[in-house]
Image: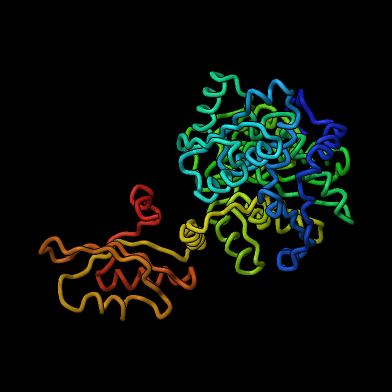
Amino acid sequence: MKGTKPVYFPKLDDVLQAALTISEISEVTPLTDSIRLSKQFNCQVRLKREDLQRVRSYKIRGAFNKISSLTGEERAKGVICASAGNHAQGVAFACFHLKIKGTIYMPSVTPKQKVEQTKLFGGEWVEIVLEGDTFDDASLAARSYGDKHEKIFVHPFDDPKIIEGQATVGLELISQSKAPIDYLFVCIGGGGLASGLISVFSELSPDTKIIGVEPKGAPSMKTSIEAGEVVALDHIDKFIDGAAVKKVGSLTYAICNYYLDNMITVDEGKACQTILDLYNRDAIVVEPAGALSIAALDDYKEEIAGKNVVCIIGGSNNDITRTAEIKERALLYGKLKHYFIIRFPQRPGALKEFVVDILGPTDDITHFEYSKKSSRENAPAVVGIELKNPEDLKPLIERMKTNNFYGDYINDKPDLFEYLV
């Protein structure tokens, strides 16, 4: 515990009431053993499968609990929310089930799959507005519209009823786990789920260490905890859209800052490799934010040995059109994908020489962009090469230099690299 004790902290009775409220629509999601991860980390790893929830994420819990708490007068005015996708689906489902009109603002970059699912769950009861490049942009627009039309704003994380709804995940975990949980890993975007879990475990399992996990490119909670106050980030990497927020909530910050055992970040590429491993080896489909809790286990390999560990898979709303980018980021993180500027001699057979003499036997060209625009002695091409092993990079570069093909290495030059990836 650190900092100032939070003014608001969910009461167990309120969480129990939330569980009763959402029981008519929420699934009790399974807690499953992971044989692969347990062997890999020499401990008992179990997965709380919120990806199998009714709207394929835990967000339905908080959204339904909040909207159910509204008065008749508030329901008549309708609700409004902003979301990168999962909260939107939860609100849409609640609006349809409770027959309440809802307006849902989503960032313009939201994966199409999440937009379509939101329309599916909400039907004629919701209107979707795509606005801005980030959740924070959409949130500002939603609040402005909501204030003007007197609609109730359903916050995705910084609201007592939302937090109490998400806390029901913790109630299920306590009842499902036969042995005490030593470590609990949870993804943090705005902090609603983590805050809810903290409230339950602080009373029912106080010895459990709760570890918050954020994307490296959007460390809003970690930055705020380190600063001792809520900090709004100037720029974030929006790739892990379910956890990419510039500013966490004041309620959730106060709870996480005081109670979290640790707050760490995970590289987006590491999360991508985890997505691929879960799909290829476990037949589990997760979205980038849903993979963060598992991706964090490497950082705790020594601490969790021999322990009972739970990772929460928060959602599975992934768009198949993102698969190529997910694979690309995973390869880059694993140092298996490399981009170069290659200077080809302007003579017949130069490309054949590069393929035969420069590339290793297991190296593969995956990107090639070249155009002869001058009569210079050497003409540049942008070449992407995929390796089987990271150790193959150094000898590859040495062969390029020895044979006068090497121009530049682009992976560590972000101004150039962003145009390729």
Q: Quadrant of the C terminus?
A: bottom left
Image coordinates of residue 183 in percent, x first then y, are 78, 51
Image coordinates of residue 248 in percent, x first then y, are 61, 32
Image coordinates of residue 379 in percent, x first then y, are 19, 64
Tell me which residue sits at (23%, 62%) in the image. Answer: 380
Tell me which residue sits at (86%, 41%) in the image. Answer: 206
In the displayed structure, would residue 157 be above or below residue 208? above
In the displayed structure, would residue 163 be above or below residue 311? above
- Judge by depth and name the residue closer to the eye, 391 or 65: 65
Residue 254 lies left or right of residue 378; in this view the side is: right
Tell me which residue sits at (54%, 45%) in the image. Answer: 241
Image coordinates of residue 314 in percent, x first then y, are 67, 49
Tell me which residue sits at (68%, 38%) in the image. Answer: 94
In the displayed structure, would residue 408 be above or below residue 105? below
Q: How many marks?
A: 0
Task: State the image quarter where residue 170 is shown.
Answer: top right
Residue 5 lies left or right of residue 117; in this view the side is: right
Residue 364 lies left or right of residue 4; in this view the side is: left
Residue 135 shows in the view = no
Task: State the image quarter where residue 371 is shown.
Answer: bottom left
- Judge by depth and name the residue closer to the eye, 350 or 29: 29
In the displayed structure, would residue 21 be above or below residue 75? below
Residue 363 lies left or right of residue 98; in this view the side is: left
Q: Quadrant of the N terminus?
A: top right
- Judge by depth and name the residue closer to the eye, 362 or 85: 85
Residue 156 shows in the view = yes
Q: How is the image coloured?
A: rainbow
